[in-house]
Amino acid sequence: MSWESFDWKTADGRSLGAGASILPLWPMLRSAIAEAISADAMCPVTCGDLTVGETTPADAPTPLEAASSFELLGTDRRGSWGALDPSKGDKIGGKVYKAGRLQELVMEALSSAFESILGEGLGLGAAVEFSAPDAPLLLLRLPLTSVDNEELVVISAYDAAVSGELAAHIVALQALASEAPAPTPPPQPQTVAQRTQELKAATAAPRPGSAMGNGNGAGAPANVRAPHLPELTAAPTGQPGYNIDLLLGVNLQVAVEIGRTTLPIRDVLALTPGSIIELDKLAGEKVDVLINGRPIAQGEVVVVDENFGVRITDVVARQQRLSPQGR
């Protein structure tokens, strides 16, 4: 099998699943990718239509080169990999490229675009290797064409779980942005004339018998009337960008942590069946509930039939749950 004959599918809700939330952003992301590669190749480059596929590292038609890793909200660091379709060559704008370099440019473009659109980039880092030869991968096929009609095709590969994680990342950042208070505009400097009028008004004493000094409140100027303020309405909450239904099918790993401790290497090497490790929590104290390794709630251990369970007693504040910082 070759990349040219690979089973590519049109990028839509069926092929991307939960990751379909990226489709409204794709025109901006595609433009960012084209601009990044154009700047590197010193030649105008356009990016064609997006198609997607699935494979594993072992089943890829050509080896996938490791490129920049990245991090989404509430997830472990994920890797990215790249390959070139040999049938389209490896040259654009007269410059020969390796797949890893092009994938790094793609990741830099995506990170910059997300920072512009959502206010936060992808936190790019060093390349990482595959977790396993049979790990499922999501493939994005990115055809590039230069102004001189040179063509190459970048195969951009990611862990399959990134599709759903990216949808959660986008919706979470959009929700946080909607909750953030609007910035207060800086005060406008006053002119000398305005400041003089304020000082005159502040120092002028009311004259006896005037409307302000007669005490009956009946001498108000005829052109003064009570302001009419329109009734405030609730802000709309059903915006398409915040549709939580996109995430209902995403699976998350739930773990319960009863405690932690730190052991020197000598004690770890001395562990045998029957050894006891003392944790940092007291008996009967609440346990931590972790979602994708991030603390979400606390609860009490219970028994359901013959299985352990947790009764939730406290939930972590929403801002802390969505914080990009680690534990």
Image (tube, helix red, strand yellow):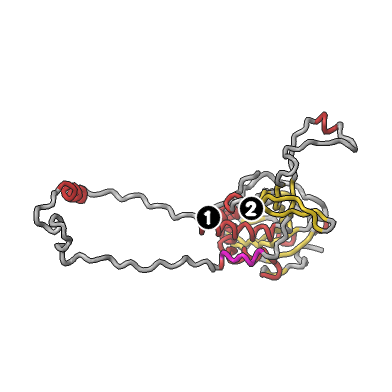
Residue 235 picture location, percent across and down: 47, 65
Would residue 243 be counted in the magenta stretch?
yes
Which amino acid type is shown beneath numbered disc 1?
Ser
* Quadrant of the frame with the N terminus: bottom right
Would residue 203 be counted in the magenta stretch?
no
How packed mark 2 is, by other alpha carbons closer than 10 Å (few <14, some 14-19, many 20 or more), is: some
In-front residue for pair 22/321: 321
Disc 2 designates what residue?
315
* Quadrant of the frame with the C terminus: top right
- Residue 230 in sight from this viewpoint: yes
Q: Is residue 146 left or right of residue 230?
A: right
Per the rendered image, the range of residues in magenta is 241-247
Label 1 sits on a secondary structure element that is helix
Q: Residue at x 40, y 52 (%)?
A: 184
Disc 1 designates what residue?
116
Q: Residue at x 89, y 37 (%)?
A: 274
Q: CA distance from mark 2 to mark 1?
A: 32 Å
Q: Residue furthest top?
A: 266
Q: Residue at x 40, y 66 (%)?
A: 232
Residue 152 picture location, percent across and down: 67, 60
